[in-house]
Image (cartoon, rainbow, N blue to C red):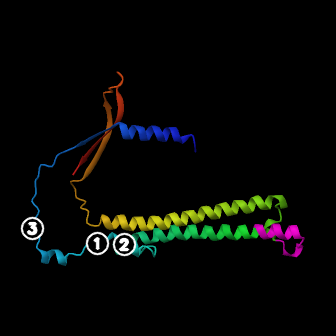
């Protein structure tokens, strides 16, 4: 994991300091039509707060935003992480009870699942199951938060116009370096709207 950090740092440094951002100016000046108070009352605004509150029940905000296709993804991911919470929690309790039964000499309560494991390995095994269960709990909480954030952001962008005039083009760029005589390499980005 630590081997990838210099590469990630170099990539982020190149992107941040090597970008040549160019934008075209808008040649079309449009005048906004005047809207009367009666017209503005009829238009109801799509509320990010409502989407956030509806997302307390996972998927509620996505239905409000008319993005119901996200429901199987949300419930699939949260269901999978919830299954792992149950699975590792159950295995943790089984390993703990097996250790207690072996320590106390209760041979009739021994679990055949752990018959090949020596007694000294049961505590590290229980701790491993506990760690995996805690990771699954963290993943479930993260997915729940992402569900709420997705609904809020989607509600903010509900009226965002995606037309054919929007484009983003990037290409390699060679730029003069002011610090040395060597050229600097980077990425040139053109954004049109």
For marks 3 and 2 on the same chain, the one whose residue lies earlier in the sequence: 3
Image point 44% across, 67% down: which residue?
A: 147
Tell me where residue 187 appears, x and y as whole percent. 34, 38
Image position of 192 with respect to 184: above or below: below
Image position of 9 with respect to 114: above or below: above
Dominant SS type (magenta): helix
Looking at the rendered structure, which numbered label has been put on residue 46? 1
Between 160 and 71, the one nearer to me in the picture: 160
Looking at the rendered structure, which numbered label has been put on residue 34? 3
Image position of 111 with respect to 160: above or below: below
Give the quarter of the figure containing the N terminus.
Answer: top right
* Residue 98 is one of the magenta-drawn residues: yes
**Residue found at the far top of this picture:** 181
Looking at the rendered structure, which numbered label has been put on residue 51? 2
Of helix, strand and loop, which one carries label 1?
loop
The number of discs equals 3
The stretch in magenta equals: 95-110
Image point 75% across, 70% down: which residue?
A: 94
The part of the image, by quadrant, that contains residue 16 is: top left
Image point 46% across, 68% down: which residue?
A: 73
Mark 1: few, some, or many residues within 10 Å (few <14, many ≥20)? some
Tell me where residue 128 appears, x and y as whole percent. 70, 59
The part of the image, by quadrant, that contains residue 49 is: bottom left
Between 167 and 128, the one nearer to me in the picture: 128
* Residue 184 is one of the magenta-drawn residues: no
* 3D distance between C-alphas at marks 3 and 2: 29 Å
Q: Are the two marked residues, 1 and 3, in contact with CB atoms closer than 8 angstroms? A: no
Q: Are the two marked residues, 1 and 2, in contact with CB atoms closer than 8 angstroms? A: yes
The part of the image, by quadrant, that contains residue 45 is: bottom left
**Residue 151 visible in this rendered orientation of the protein:** yes
* 3D distance between C-alphas at marks 1 and 3: 21 Å
């Amino acid at each position: 994991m630590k081997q990838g950090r210099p590469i990630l740092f170099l990539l982020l440094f190149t992107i941040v300091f090597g970008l040549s951002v160019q934008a075209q100016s808008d040649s079309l000046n449009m005048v906004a039509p005047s809207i009367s108070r009666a017209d503005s009352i009829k238009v109801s605004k799509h509320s990010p707060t409502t989407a956030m509150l509806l997302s307390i029940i996972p998927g509620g905000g996505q239905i409000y935003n008319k993005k119901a296709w996200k429901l199987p993804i949300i419930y699939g991911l949260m269901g999978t992480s919830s299954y792992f919470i149950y699975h590792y929690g159950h295995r943790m309790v089984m390993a703990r009870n097996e250790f207690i039964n072996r320590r106390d000499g209760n041979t009739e309560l021994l679990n055949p699942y752990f018959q090949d494991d020596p007694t000294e390995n049961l505590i590290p095994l229980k701790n491993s199951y506990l760690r995996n269960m805690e990771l699954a709990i963290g993943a479930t909480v993260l997915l729940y938060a992402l569900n709420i954030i997705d609904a809020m952001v989607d509600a903010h962008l509900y009226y965002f116009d995606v037309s054919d005039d929007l484009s983003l083009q990037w290409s390699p760029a060679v730029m003069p370096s002011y610090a040395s005589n060597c050229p600097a390499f980077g990425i040139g980005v053109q954004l049109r709207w």
